[in-house]
Amino acid sequence: MDIRNIGLDQSKESSLDIYQSKTDEKLPGIVIIGGGSYKQLKERDTERVALTFATQAFQAFVVKYPVLEKKNYQDAKASIEQSFDYIIKHADELNVDTDKLGIIGFSAGGQLAADYSNEKHSHAKFAMLGYPVIKPTLDKKMGIKSLDVSKTVSSITPPTFIWGSINDELTPFLDHVHVYAEALAKNNVPFEVHEFGTGNHGIALANKWTAIVNRDRADKHMARWFELGMEWLQEVVGIK
């Protein structure tokens, strides 16, 4: 595997980490948007997720969008757009099947992933959202100005897979996952939702692999989201 970083906008300290499997075959691609409340990009849902998708024969990419003093919602969106543009432009050398290129986001990264997937010019063929922020209820806490991404859903939004925990007090089901799923249903967008009765916010893959960098937080039941997500990709998106 070739792992490298390319710069996107140095003035805003944004870049793209590339996890490229060495193969002559074009593989599906996944663009990963981590959470962290714009304070940092959590390892639990960036590189560890990228390596996990790589084991499933994906070319994986992690967007490093601006955080801390550089944080800005619109600049973060621009980082995602620039990342997709780079992948599309270099698809042949990256061995990416652009018809099977999607996005996954966690928490605040889930809001950004949803927002990008709803754009008219989006290159995402599917979206996966883990315990996502949907409404701008956390803007004050995160120090940014975002928007209600459920209102940007339309008939062109790609198939979407969502999971979360009913125990999540940071992004409660009724305020976030529910309103987004409702918007998808109203616009006839194929979707699947798993709201687990165990687990909580911010546990990424929810297994030992991420628990060792996440205060030993794991949940065997909620960890099934990844297996379920892979099945969904096969059945709904056609990724084998």
Image: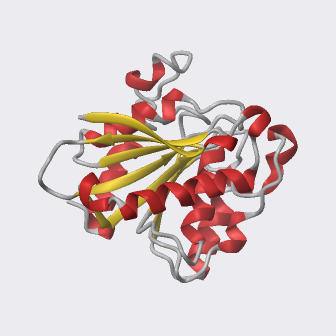
Residue at image point 75% right, 32% down: 68
Q: Quadrant of residue 215?
A: top right
Q: Position of residue 181 (x, y in %)?
A: 59, 66
Count how many numbered circles sit on residues in the image: 0
Q: Is residue 57 left or right of residue 192?
A: left
Q: Quadrant of residue 98?
A: bottom left
Q: Is residue 113 left or right of residue 86?
A: right
139 or 183: nearer the viewer: 139
Q: Is residue 98 left or right of residue 197?
A: left
Residue at image point 11% right, 53% down: 24
In the depicted structure, whether residue 70 falls above or below residue 126: above
Q: Residue furthest left?
A: 24
Q: Position of residue 238 (x, y in %)?
A: 26, 68
158 or 27: nearer the viewer: 27
Q: Residue furthest front?
A: 11
In the depicted structure, whether residue 13 falls above or below residue 23: above
- The image quadrant where one finds the C terminus is bottom left
Q: In this figure, which colouring scheme has been used for the structure?
A: secondary structure
In the depicted structure, whether residue 38 falls above or below residue 157: above
Q: Position of residue 30 (x, y in %)?
A: 38, 52
Residue at image point 44% right, 51% down: 31
Q: Residue furthest right?
A: 140
Q: Position of residue 159 (x, y in %)?
A: 44, 70
- The image quadrant where one finds the N terminus is top left
